Image (tube, grey):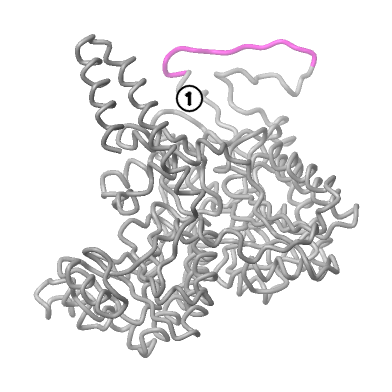
Amino acid sequence: MKGIWEIIKAIGKFIQGTGTFALGTLVLLLLVFALAGSQRSSELKAGVSVPKGAVLLLNPRGNIVELKQEVSPFDIALTEFSNAPVETSIHDILKAIHNAKNDKRIGAIALYTDSMGGAGIAHLHDIVDALKDFKTTDKPVYAISSSYSQGDYLIASQADQIFMNKAGSALLTGYNANLTYFKGMLDKVGVTVNIFHVGDYKSAIEPYERTSMSDEARASYEFLFNGLWNDYLSVISEARGMDKAALQQHLDQFPEEFKTVKGNFAEYALKTRLVDTLASRVDYRNVLADKHGQSGDTFKQISMQNYLRATKDWNSSSSSNEIPVLIAQGNIVGGYGNVTVVAAETVARDIRRLRKDENTKAIVLRVNSPGGSAYASEIIRQELVAAQAQGIPVVVSMGPVAASGGYWISAEADEIWASPTTITGSIGIFGMIPTFEKVTSEIGISSDSVGTSKWMKGMGIADPLNEAYSSVISANIQNGYDEFLDLVARGRNMTKETVHEIAQGRVWTGRQALENGLVDKLGTLDDAINAAAKLADIENYNSYIVKDAPDEFDEMLKQLLRRNSDTNAPKINPAQKVLKAFKKEFEFLSLFNDPQGRYILCTGCGVQE
């Protein structure tokens, strides 16, 4: 290797001498990638070694998602200058924990949360359940962080020992919704938003017609959050051996109790038994090294990424029977798209390909979506029905959110599985049409029209929405709501009247949805896959997540560039958080591309930690 780096240095000097910096830098990068890639390729062929008695490092980086976005190796190399997303798949985390449970080479799990971003509540509970299952083998779990957010702490609570830095904090604030309302701004700039909706609880449109939350929306959120918070406290109190009522009392009295520790967050966390040990990095490394063995200047360990590579062929079957898991994550939109949205044409294409494959014996649709375009949702539903018509069972597994359009595409599945903390329901529909007659009048712009349809008269940029066209939209929205009710009634074997009682845009937790009949059972993705196998009447099969096949060379470069970057994803600072919130609002508006202007969307369902 010394000779190789001498060659690279020589090329670098040549580049400096000739002055062709940009071209030379590119050549140098390609050479480094090629040489290092060759070395990495040899390492991969040799396989990943799992040290006996090693501690498995679970270090989620960025947001926890169903399916990660594809990122080019050059974006990874230039992370500081690119907007390359940093994400971790929930299924990678769960697979690593599951494999480690019965792997005699793994002696413990160490959970690092410093680099973890946002996560859906159901995803966090999935990790909690997986850690509980791991601990049945009497292998210890350690939680290590400089500070714990509320979401971090839910999974950290399962640890046998929780370490926190003396300069850190662990603060539980409960669930809340802070919504942004635009009506005041729209009024000031002279924009009229014409809104059409059915149901008392469709809060998606409130930011455009109100300046504050309606009583119905507030009641719906309170009902939802109380259910989710009760589950959260139950997990924490059971894991930490606390009384749930006493824990809630501590949280309610936080401002007063905080004064007793002189404003020290770490001491408060220790006093209230949220953490076990205040320790520096050197301290916890020494503790784990004493218990699990030394490796260099730290304890014996293996990263989650390396462990997954070492166990990638576990649990595979020689059977040709397949149960593919199709991920539907993000807002539902028309056209084609990447994994950040449920693009109707992309998903429909994947379903068609799967149902034409003779090895496909059942399809599991994994839904993590608040909905979106009604038309796009219907395109996806029709393809799923076509698969069922061929005798292929369709089972839905709901992730953190499966509401509005997310429920539309789920309703007629042979079975629906949800997490207890899934947010679902929101059976309603709305439409929005902005008009600009006020602002155009102020600046002297007017419209006039001529045509063959009287009811389309007055549709210029400076005209208000006329009554005739408004009545057409209203009728169409009512028709869409009736279609939604009929769909759910048919899929869930209910009367239309019964569906209406639990619909009207209202949201429910998975546990509540089980009680009112919107889902069949509570369980994990694995439970849904097993249910699909039973419906297909097969015992031996392979299950896999549907995604585009990666380029082998790209994957090699990614592994090379990420091998030393496991802890390089700091949490988002407050300023970035505000900017991202505004960016998200404007990106949300750009998703309104339904050809009929009808949307089945729950904007307040994406509760994340």
Residue 353, horizontal then vertical, whole percent: 78, 42
> Given the image, on which type of amino acid does mark 1 rest?
Lys
Where are the magenta residues, as a range?
A: 441-452
* Residue under label 1: 438
Tell me what residue is drawn at x 55 percent, y 27 percent.
Answer: 435
**Vertically, is 450 above or below 174?**
above
Q: Which residue is more in the foreground, 508 or 351?
A: 351
Residue 508, horizontal then vertical, whole percent: 59, 67
Which residue is the extreme one toward the left?
262
Q: Quadrant of the N terminus?
A: top left
Q: Which residue is more in the foreground, 475 or 224?
A: 224
Is 285 positioned to the left or the right of 372 in the image?
left
Residue 447 sits inside the magenta stretch? yes
For disc 1, the neighbor class at 10 Å (few under 14, some 14 to 19, many from 20) is: some
Residue 375 sits inside the magenta stretch? no
Residue 64, horizontal then vertical, whole percent: 46, 56
**Vertically, is 81 above or below 60?**
above
Tell me what residue is drawn at x 19 percent, y 68 percent.
Answer: 165
Tell me what residue is drawn at x 29 percent, y 78 percent.
Answer: 252
Is 601 positioned to the left or the right of 81 in the image?
right
Is 514 positioned to the left or the right of 212 in the image?
right
Q: Quadrant of the C terminus?
A: bottom left
**Vertically, is 414 above or below 387?**
below
Dominant SS in magenta = loop
Residue 94, horizontal then vertical, whole percent: 52, 66
